[in-house]
Amino acid sequence: MSDPGFVPLADYREFPPAEMRARARDFADEMSRRRTVREFSDRAVDRVVIEHCLRAAGTAPSGANQQPWRFVAVTDAALKRRIREAAEAEEREFYSHRAPAEWLSALAPLGTDADKPFLETAPWLIGVFYERYGVDAAGAKSKRYYPHESVGIACGLLIASLHHAGLATLTHTPSPMGFLNELLGRPRHEMPYLLLVVGFPAPDCRVPDIRRLELRQYATFLEGTGTGDATR
């Protein structure tokens, strides 16, 4: 007799080997075009697109299936301005006092500074939070397991989905980010994880001339041959 807490895996789809390889290659090629941008157009983006991408993010695996992610999608111009003002205040402290010289040196090739106009220009900001603990209707607390890892995976799916839909993104992490709880009306048990900037690139958008690592530099295959060959 089957366990009543389980159901058949009904939606899984397997593909022929050649199609699997093609699908994997095509997705990798598509994601290789993804670039973080800091110059956004103010062109509107349909809310339905954002909703579908958030639905994709919500399919991420999570510790004990607790799904500790919370997303707040913002288009309100006045609220975006307040977010920018608060973020830039923290960024000025970071660049002027908090950041060690080594960190500033690492950021220098990217051309970043405390000015964040994209927080107002881009049509959407998505505040991402993770639950430190759950709170039920009676106010009782429950532990959350692996919330950072779970929300990180969800954010990866969200970024991939937005890119797949034809949008550009920027992961913005001013530190500290406690101002997001106040501005976005989130409870104290939710912790800001990142602020995702979403929209179309500006027509004249430029990005740093950087290169990604090659597969062999970050992946090792142990297939029983003892070669560890990542180039097969």
Image (spheres, rainbow, N blue to C red):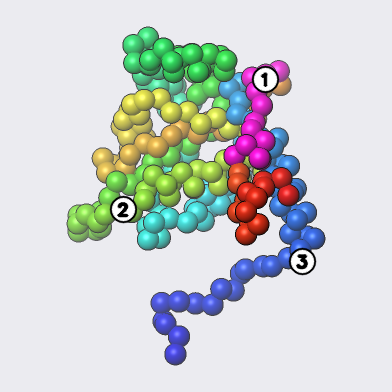
Q: Which residue is mark 3?
A: 16
The span picked out in magenta is 204-218
**Cβ–Cβ under 8 Å for marks 3 and 2:** no
Which secondary structure is most common in the magenta stretch?
Answer: loop
Residue sitting nearer the eye, 65 or 82: 65
Q: Is residue 122 magenta?
A: no
Looking at the rendered image, the quarter that the N terminus falls into is bottom left
Kind of residue at badge 2: Arg
Q: Is residue 45 left or right of residue 33?
A: left
Q: Amino acid at mark 1?
A: Asp
Q: CA distance from mark 1 to mark 2?
A: 40 Å
Could you tell me how far apart the alpha carbons at marks 3 and 2 are, in whole angstroms? 39 Å
Residue at 47%, 56% (x, y): give it.
Answer: 61
- Where does the image place residue 230, in percent across and percent down from the top left? 67, 46
Relative to residue 12, is residue 61 drawn left or right?
left
- Which residue is depicted at the point 43% across and 39% down? 128
Residue 76 visible from this viewpoint = no
Q: Secondary structure at mark 1?
A: loop
Label 2 near label 1: C-beta < 8 Å? no
Q: Residue at x 43, y 50 (%)?
A: 150
Is residue 220 visible in this depiction of the protein? yes
The crowding category of the residue bearing disc 1, from other C-alpha atoms within 10 Å (few below 14, some 14 to 19, many at least 20), is few
Q: Quadrant of residue 177?
A: top left
Residue projecting furthest to the right: 18
Which residue is label 1 attached to? 209
- Which label number is shown at residue 144? 2
- How far is mark 3 from mark 1, CA to CA? 38 Å
Q: Earlier in the sequence, mark 3 or mark 1?
A: 3
